[in-house]
Image (cartoon, rainbow, N blue to C red):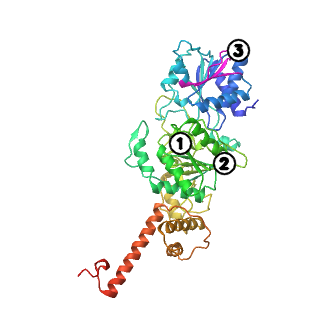
Amino acid sequence: MPELRDYQRSAIDKIRNYFAKGKKNVLLVAPTGSGKTVIASSMIDQALSKGKSCLFVAHRRELVMQCSRKLADFRVNHGVLMANKSETEEAKAQVASVQTFTSRKDRDDFVKPQADLVILDEAHRSVSNSFQELINEYPNAYVVGLTATPCRSDGRGLGNIYDELVEAASIQELIDQGYLVPNRILAPTMPDLKGIKIVAGDYEKRSLDKKMNTPKLVGDIVTHWQLHGENRPTVVFASSINHSQQIARMFNNFGIAAGHIDGVMPELEREQQLNDFDTGKIKVLCNCQVLTEGWDQPKVSCVIIARPTRSYVMYLQMVGRSLRPDDGKKDTLIIDHSGSVYQHGFPEDTPAWILTEDKIDLVPKEEQPIDKQPFTCIKCDTVYKPTKDNPECPNCAFVPTKKETELLIKEGRLVELKKEKTEPTAIEKQIFYSQLKHYGKSKGFKPGWADWTFKEKYGHFPHTKKIGLKPPTEEVKNFIKHLLIKKAKRREKYVRATTGIQDPQNEGSD
């Protein structure tokens, strides 16, 4: 039977104290990876020992089965109420899909589970009609909601549903105790989101996808992963199904095994992709709004955010997928192509949550102290927290100039600094050369073309020629086009100078 951690026991005690004071609906806030399901299973086990009946409710199949497995760890006899499964009437503990419950509750043959205690997973969804219908079926039960973020996707609070809030532990506390791993953040690109409409508190999906799903941005994702991803097991959050598929396709084109899952693909196909990722058959798993909740794979040590979001809930759900510890895992890498770290801050800087029905307004980033503000190193793209006394980048040890530092800390506001032109790394040159080789082969150019084109850019020939072929990015294609145009102009100028003919193509027309 699992042994509870100190903060887990403390959270259960606080919930019990509120119950004793007559507070029947309590919201438990705990970060992703903190063991909310363990807390819930322990509460169910303790309630059953006192002769009470319990109901655990989730909105997705994966979450239902996750709780079922955890109850099995506690040796709790329970039933599962879900599609293609029938409730176990004799069991005093039931784990239910909210969709299955609401679809069956009005049927004559449905036996409603008894429940003195109702536990709702992903409780920020408690405002949905299906959850509300279920809650109304148990007016006398004690209700515990589980969530990492006690607010709705539109930013409004849950104070109209819950009476009290219990915070188990913060992300930083769990990192300090070794229950979560520290994170490193890179922000190599930032999209231009001007003009995108806001619908239901977040970016309008179609406009967002049009902005993010471009060959250049998709190519940037793969290129920066090659430079910084350290071949880590990686999850990519995309803006749409098509965007996710395009990113997976680009990774595969570069010889990096990648897969894709979404919410509409057949269940068996989705499970196969997840299994391929679990076993290491694929290195990168791309998705659109599937892996933000209820997926637990500790081996993930890199998250690519390619989906801008105004939702703080969504942001924490995405980064939280990689914070769980695992054997040999020292930290996690977050590569942010969405600007989310600038909008929402660092994952560990979560606010002190309060219960309210109104919109929860987080402290604007420009009003936060300088050591809470994101700053991207102009040398290595690492996002860090500089201070007045120590503005040095923790990754590359770059120290901004005095003028840059003064700008950075001026009035406690983030000041974006222009990136300086830096010497390309050996890896960057290698990737560039592999793309030239691919382009030259596809066009039937002579074998030496790639070498001379490389020299044109860097002033020397490539140091190694034993390299694979990679499809060129749009940036590389534009560079090649620029060189070809420049070469054509030089040839035209030479012809005019030696023959007097203005346009070689018109030679002999008179």
Which numbered mark, 2 or 3, is in the foreground of this view? 2
| Image disc number at residue 280 | 2
Amino acid carrying mark 3 in the image = Gly
Tell me the crowding category of disc 2: few under 14, some 14 to 19, or many 20 or more residues within 10 angstroms, Cα based. Answer: few
Camera-side residue: 482 or 334?
A: 482
- The residue identified by callout 1 is 315
Residue 376 seen by the camera:
no
For marks 1 and 2, the one nearer the N-term is 2
**Magenta span of residues:** 77-99
Give the quarter of the figure containing the N terminus: top right
Rendered view: 108 above or below 252 = above
Q: Position of residue 179 (x, y in %)?
A: 69, 41
For marks 1 and 3, the one nearer the N-term is 3
Examine the structure image and report whether residue 15 is included in the region drawn in magenta: no
- The residue identified by callout 3 is 51
Which numbered mark, 1 or 2, is in the foreground of this view? 2
Separation of residues labelled 2 and 3 (CA atoms): 45 Å
